[in-house]
Amino acid sequence: MHSYLDRRIGNIAAIWGVAGACMVLGYAVLRMLRQVTEGFQHPLNAAHYAVMIPWLFFMLYSEGYKGFQKGYSPRVAARANYLREHATLLRTVLAPLFCMGFFHSTKKRKIVIGCLFLGVTMLVVLFQYISQPWRGVLDLGVVLGLSWGILATLYFFVKYWFGDATDADPEVP
């Protein structure tokens, strides 16, 4: 891609890809915040706090730091950076799915993203059967982890946009 128009399309595709990926996470956060708010309208006892405190630390570390900051977020940003130079019509239209790794990615990445998608879907279904305030307590940890993921994705995107992508692997075939 060398023309001015190609660069503009690549830039739009990259921005759309990251924005769309963050909107998916943001939608999940907004939906869960209702459950968190509802959960905290119930009286909490020592057992709730005994579960909540370690759960929050676990989710911030495992989902926020390990899952997003060390894996998902830099990869989404690297794929958006790759998209800037390799935009096609399909990749541009489906940029969020491209950036998340659902297509034009390595076989391993497609398997991992598919399993992750199924696992998260199963957890969402299972969490619906947990009564309040427990559901709110557990959803709070997920909300914090997903929020960390949104911020990490935006951080890496800005970092890579300005040329600091030395450690980025877009995992394209």
Image (cartoon, helix red, strand yellow):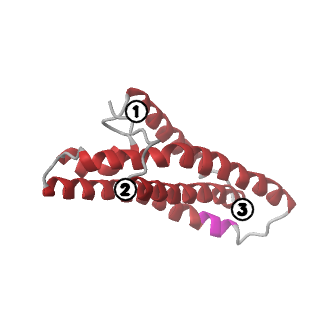
Please state which of the two labelled residues, at mark 2 or mark 3, is closer to the viewer: 2
Asked if the residue under mark 1 is in contact with the one under mark 2, i.e. CB atoms within 8 Å, the reply is no
The residue carrying mark 3 is: 133
Task: Residue 97: give x, y in percent of width and height.
Answer: 34, 46
Relative depth, front residue between 155 and 4: 4
- Looking at marks 2 and 1 on the same chain, the residue that comes earlier in the sequence is marked by 1
What residue is pinned by disc 1?
A: 110
Left or right of 49? Residue 106 is: left
Ranked by sequence position, the earlier of labels 2 and 3 is 3
Residue with the mark numbered 2: 161
Q: Residue lying furthest right in this view?
A: 46
Q: Are marks 2 and 3 in contact (CB under 8 Å)?
A: no
Q: Is residue 129 left or right of residue 82?
A: right
Q: Residues within 10 Å of mark 1 (few under 14, many from 20)?
A: some
Residue 101 vs 43, above or below: the answer is above
Picture residue at 15% right of the left edge, 49% below the top: 2
Q: Kindly report the distance in space between the C-alpha atoms of the residues bearing marks 3 and 1.
A: 36 Å
Residue shown at 38% from the left, 57% from the top: 162
What main secondary structure does the magenta stretch of the protein show?
A: helix
Image quadrant holding the C terminus, namely: top left
Q: CA distance from mark 2 to mark 3?
A: 42 Å
Percent coordinates x, y for residue 51 in the rendering: 79, 53
**Magenta stretch?**
35-39
Displayed quadrant of residue 11? bottom left
Q: Position of residue 154 (x, y in %)?
A: 46, 59
Question: Element at badge 1?
Answer: helix
**Along the horizontal axis of the image, is 117 left or right of 56?**
left
Which label lies toward us, 2 or 1?
2
Which residue is nearer to you in this view: 56 or 151? 151
Q: Is residue 18 magenta?
A: no
Looking at the image, can residue 158 be seen?
yes
Q: How packed is label 2: few (under 14 Cα within 10 Å), some, or many (20 or more)? A: some
